[in-house]
Amino acid sequence: MPVVAIAALVLAGGAAGAVILLRHKAYEPVLKLPGVKVTQGKRIGQLLVETDASMTPDEVAKQYRVTFEALRALVMEALPDVPIAEPVAEIVTVPQAVLCDPQIVVDVKPCQVNPWANVSPRVLMIINDRTRLPDAMKRGLADAVCLYDSTSSSTIAKQICKVTDAFAARLP
């Protein structure tokens, strides 16, 4: 009987150890970028947010939601019959140096706070600085809504870009 009890304790301890090891498995990023160590990720609705631990995915997603709703309201006020779809599929926080790498950024000048990842057009890279997040998100979403409006004519697209440019230029 004592041998069975010891075996049960060893097995239980091994199972507990396995559970602990499984819980501490490192996060595997969906988007792998040179110079970025993504340590956290979370899908929030249709949006995937991956971070380098500078901020939590929830913080970034909350800023995205607040900013996108403000931008959508402004566009709807100016162009009430124009629907604005979610322009971003993924957001990744990255160091400033990554934003200056022409192999990684696309569609904008390198070194801005919110360029688009070269691997996918709907991946918004945001500088990993909490103090700059609101402005970076505002500029990134303004660009996204302007760039990825595929439902409008070129005339309406130009009007949308005019509204989003004004939104991005506003002080926080």
Image: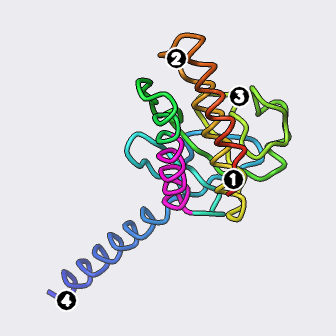
Q: Nearer the viewer, residue 102 or 165?
A: 165
Q: Nearer the viewer, mark 3 or mark 1?
A: 1
Q: Residues within 10 Å of mark 2 (few under 14, many from 20)?
A: few
Residue 98: name its quadrant.
Answer: top right
Name of the residue lying farthest toward the front:
78
Check disc 3 and report the residue beneath it. 118
Q: Quadrant of the N terminus?
A: bottom left
Image x and y of residue 106, in percent:
75, 28
- Residue at the (69%, 53%) spot, across then down: 135
In this rendering, the answer to whether 72 lies above or below 11 is: above
Q: Residues within 10 Å of mark 4 (few under 14, many from 20)?
A: few
Check disc 2 and report the residue beneath it. 150
Check disc 4 and report the residue beneath it. 2
Counting residues from the start of the chain, the first of labels 3 and 1 encountered is: 3
Secondary structure beneath label 1: helix
Counting residues from the start of the chain, the first of labels 1 and 2 encountered is: 1
Secondary structure beneath label 4: helix
